[in-house]
Image: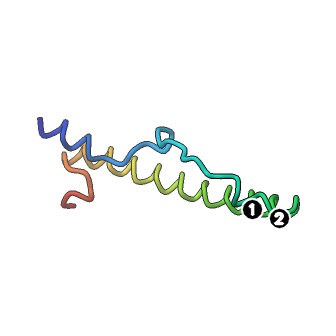
Amino acid sequence: MTLVVALSACATSPDKVKAQYMPDTAYASLTCPQLGKAELKQGDEVSGLYNSQRRAHKTDTWTVLAVGVPRYLGL
């Protein structure tokens, strides 16, 4: 039972994080070059967040396997 509870508290795999709706009104007034810059900037942000979430998921998985408790629940 403890292992089930511990596994449910782990960070979610980034592949399982659901996308959120973003209204297009934030981009409606931008020019093509501005849209291109915004896309590059957001791509970098998403990549960084994805990698951070992936590291958290891996760390939690290994911590649960080794100790039985996710890192943010007391380690």
Q: Residue furthest toward the right? A: 32
Asked if the residues shown at circle 2 and circle 1 are in contact, with their CB atoms under 8 angstroms apart, the answer is yes
Q: Which mark is residue 74?
A: none
Is disc 2 placed on a helix, strand or loop?
helix
Image quadrant in which the C terminus is located: bottom left
Residue at left offset 80%, top offset 59%: 35
With respect to residue 19, does 26 lie above or below? below
- Please state the horizontal and vertical placement of residue 47, each as a whole percent of the image: 61, 54
- Please state the horizontal and vertical placement of residue 62, each as a whole percent of the image: 32, 46
- Please state the horizontal and vertical placement of residue 73, each as a whole percent of the image: 21, 57
Residue at numbered disc 2 = 34
With respect to residue 49, does 57 lie above or below? above
Left or right side of 51 for 72 = left
Query: What count of labels does the image hold?
Result: 2
Q: Residue type at mark 2? A: Gln
- Please state the horizontal and vertical placement of residue 49, each as a whole percent of the image: 53, 57
Residue at numbered disc 1 = 38
Q: Residue type at mark 1? A: Ala
Instruction: Between residue 71 and residue 19, name the one nearer to us.
Output: 19
Give the colour scheme shown: rainbow
With respect to residue 9, does 29 lie above or below? below
Residue at left offset 44%, top offset 42%: 13
Is disc 1 placed on a helix, strand or loop?
helix
Indicate the quadrant where residue 28 lies.
bottom right
Give how far apart the Cα atoms at labels 2 and 1 are. 6 Å
Left or right side of 30 for 56 = left
Residue at left offset 58%, top offset 47%: 21
Residue at left offset 40%, top offset 53%: 56
Instruction: Between residue 18 and residue 16, name the one nearer to us.
Output: 18
Q: Residues within 10 Å of mark 2 (few under 14, many from 20)?
A: few
Left or right side of 18 for 64 = left
